[in-house]
Amino acid sequence: MFKKSVAELGRALIAGEVSAVELARFFLERIESHKDLNAFLDVRPEVTLAQARAADARIARGEATPLTGVPIAHKDIFVTRDFHSTASSRMLEGYLSPFDATVVEKLGSAGMVALGKLNCDEFAMGSSNENSHYGNVLNPWDKTAVPGGSSGGSAAAVAARITPAATATDTGGSIREPAAFSGVTGIKPTYGRASRWGMIAFASSLDQAGIMTRSAEDAALIFNAMLGFDPKDSTSVERAHEDYTRSLDVDLKGLRIGVPKEFFGDGLQPDVEKAVREALAEYVKLGVKLVDISLPNAALGIPVYYVIAPAECSSNLSRFDGVRYGHRAARYSDLIDMMKKSRSEGFGPEPKRRILIGTYVLSHGYYDAYYIQAQKVRRIIADEFQRAFRECDLIAGPVTTSVAFGFGEKAADPVAMYLSDLYTIPGSLAGIPGMSIPCGFGAKNRPVGLQLMANYFDEARLLGAAHRYQQATDWHLRVPPAAKE
Amino acid sequence: MIPYRTAAVNKKRVSQEPPGRGHRPCVLLPVPFLNPAATTEASHEMALTLSDVKRIAHLARIEVTDAEAGQALGQLNDIFRLIEQLQSVDTSGIEPMSHPLGGSQRLREDVVSSTENREANMRNAPSQLDGLFLVPRVIE
């Protein structure tokens, strides 16, 4: 049962082969028996089972969607009415939202059953999930390795088959990097496709919700229910509804995939390069034409990102003042002291570090030199993608320079950790859709991800190319040791 | 390596170059060059001082002990060495990109769009009385 895809589960539910309540109980038991992975932060069987009963009633009425009754879990960056929403921070311990995030509400409206909330890096800041106030998430392939971050709980839970799908968010690579490290399929859509309403804000010009699944086909099915215009999000794009499954079976003959030479430079580990090159060769067998392209300033994405993201983070996180919600210190002398003590106790080291960087780069005398300069270089990088897309339909390369690293290996050195996102940040800055699909194994039998990127609003083609690869290979069907426990 | 304190001055000089020339592509730096540890020796000036860190922390309303400020100082300077690469990019004639899809901010009709739900909205308040948030005395 745990090996079934979202598409298969949806069909089995409609055919009456299994009930939503049976499925919910099955996955709740798997959550319980895989507690050592620390993927879940809040599980409430009574909430999940009530949603499952409603799904069964809907199926009985003949009103089911392809997703009705299929379980899903949500990254704890999305606020939920029925589960605590903490952003993995002490600051929001026990927080109960008055409303559901739009993404949560849309998937609930399609009939998906929420299993609970997933661990992540605090306020989605991190690349290893080691920044959670609630402890590390373990990689199901190798429990001494990080699952990636910030959506580490989402990646580990999907990899270990304790949920068929999980929501996730991406600011600089927080979907693609953990998907690669944990051997699952992860996709972020074009900026503006998924509503940011109810997503606890980190860097608003970059934050974008996406999904982790076992396959591209499952991601396409969920995108059909999850994406779309939301008047409550000021940067939501108004476009007609699309069927993201429409290109799944399109022949790849003649498709041009651009391979940026900068993504294969010094620093890329040979095991990752080998798996990625083999994946590209597989695409050639499928009729794809590989095109050499260049993204000359892609590596400047890291310094650009570490100006823009902290700047927006320092602004967004100023709302946590210990007055309306969130942690308040027990002892303080006056209002300012209360805010200072509450914030310094409530935030962990990484959010504090980014708040300090952001406060500095936005301060008087440095705003133009840092923040505006970073926004200009951001445009240079985005323009380079547009030039590249004149020569190709999709772009492919590695997601990360190496396979998943071990706990503690980079935790003491923020800059080394920041470099984990070298290949994912450029696409995030441009705002284009990107995904990671499993394409083999590297050192210590840890998974390798292939990154695929498309131009704005070209998710259907991106998902189609990923699906065809997954029809020809079985990397995405490999099950980690922890899933069999 | 440009000392951070002169960054604003340097920026001014860059902006005086003739506009409309487009940007000069910057050579992509391989990963080892992105590692600030590799360029530490070339840097003759530490950008931030301990008092800078404390001042920024105060502006950000975060309390830091001397030990925390000391630890943050080293890490922040590492990060600023990374960020400093941006100063060498010629961006004359380039518009800042504040949003991936550009365009203007969408406006909504000036009508009531959300319902009042005081109880749910105040449920998470650390301290409240009669539907009001409580804070320490601010006016003597």
Image: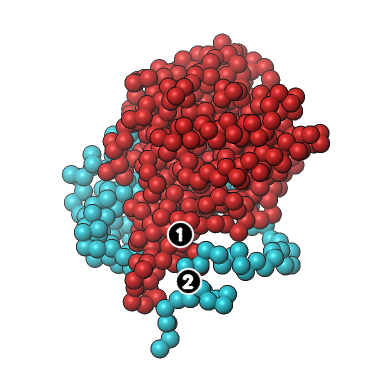
Residue holding disc 2: B127
Picture quadrant of residue B26: top left
Chain that appears red = A
Q: What's the residue at 66%, 44% (across, down)?
A: A50
Q: What's the residue at 71%, 23% (across, down)?
A: A17
Q: What's the residue at 23%, 54% (across, down)?
A: B71
Say which amino acid is labelled 2. Answer: Ser
Say which amino acid is labelled 1. Answer: Leu
Under circle 1, the secondary element is helix
User: Chain B colour?
Assistant: cyan
Chain letter belonging to callout 1:
A
Q: Can residue B51 be seen in this snapshot?
A: yes
Label 1 to label 2, Cα distance in Å? Answer: 20 Å
| Front residue of this view, candidates A318 and A424 | A318
Residue A410 vertical placement versus A96 (above, below): above
Query: Is residue A346 left or right of A69 when viewed as pictured?
Result: left
Residue A337 placement (x, y as % from top left): 35, 72
Please rate how many residues cluster around mark 1, counting C-alpha atoms within 10 Å: few if below 14, some from 14 to 19, many from 20: many
